[in-house]
Amino acid sequence: MMRITQKDRVFLALLPTVAAVAGYVFFVARPVDAEAARFDKRRLALGSERDIAARRDRLAEEQKGLRESLKALEDAPPEAKATDSASRLKRLQEGARAAGVRLLSVRQDAGPNAVRPAAGAAQAQAWTVTVEAPYEAVGRLLDEFSRVTPPIVPEALSMRPGAGEGKPNYWMITLCL
C-alpha cells in the first residue's frame, strides 16, 4: 500500500487551486485584457469628444447642403432635368475612358423591351453598350458609372468570350441613364 506524505498532501491540496487560477488567467483574464486593449485602441482612434463633435457638426452641415441641392433638383422644371442623347453618350464615353474600356457599340433602346425608368425619373433612357474588356475592367467601368452624377444604373449584363486565347471578352451592358 502506498503512503502519502505530508508534502504530497499539501501538494494535492494546492494543485486544484493553482490549476483554477492558471485556467482563469489563461482562458479568461488574457482574452479580456486583449479585448480591452483593442477597445482602447479603437476609442483612441476616434479622437476626443471635441473631435467627434466637430466631425458630427461638419457632417450635419454637409448633409444639410446635400438636402438643399436635392430639393433644388427636385423642384427644377422637367426641361432642366432632361439631357439630350449627345450628353448621355459623352457621360458613357467618359466613364469608359476612366475605366480603360473600349466601347464597340452604343445604341439607345426603344420599344416594348426598353428599360422602364424608376418612379420620379421619367427622363431616364435605356442604352445598350457593347464593350471589349477583361473582367476587372468591366468591374471598374461599373464602379465608375456608379460615381458619376446622376449615376448610370446597369440593368443587365451578358458576356461573350473573345475570339481566341488571351483575347478580351465582349460584354453587352444595358444601362439606364
Image (cartoon, rainbow, N blue to C red):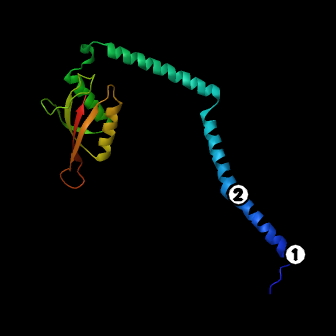
> Could you tell me residue 62's position as x and y percent?
48, 21
Compared across the picture, whether 100 is left or right of 38 comes to left
Q: Nearer the viewer, residue 4 or 23?
A: 4
- Mark number displayed over residue 97: none
Residue for badge 1: 6
Asked if residue 28 is positioned above or below residue 137 in the image, the reply reads below
Q: Residue at x 79, y 71 (%)?
A: 12
* SS type, badge 1: helix
Q: Residue at x 80, y 67 (%)?
A: 14
The type of residue carrying mark 1 is Gln
Label 2 vs label 1: CA separation? Answer: 28 Å
Whether tag 2 and tag 1 are in contact, CB under 8 A, the answer is no
Asked if residue 19 is positioned above or below residue 36 in the image, the reply reads below
Q: Nearer the viewer, residue 48 or 134?
A: 48
Q: Residue at x 73, y 64 (%)?
A: 19
Q: Nearer the viewer, mark 2 or mark 1?
A: 1
Q: Residue furthest bottom?
A: 1
Residue for badge 2: 24
Asked if residue 17 is positioned above or below residue 89 in the image, the reply reads below
* SS type, badge 2: helix
Q: Nearer the viewer, residue 117 or 171?
A: 117
Quadrant housing residue 69 = top left
Q: Earlier in the sequence, mark 2 or mark 1?
A: 1
> Could you tell me residue 104's position as x and y percent?
19, 38
Classed neighbour count for the residue bearing mark 2: other residues with Cα under 10 Å, few (<14), some (14–19), many (≥20): few
Q: Quadrant of the C terminus?
A: top left
> Could you tell me residue 23's position as x and y percent?
70, 61
Q: Quadrant of the N terminus?
A: bottom right
Q: Residue furthest left?
A: 111
Quadrant housing residue 99 = top left
Classed neighbour count for the residue bearing mark 1: other residues with Cα under 10 Å, few (<14), some (14–19), many (≥20): few
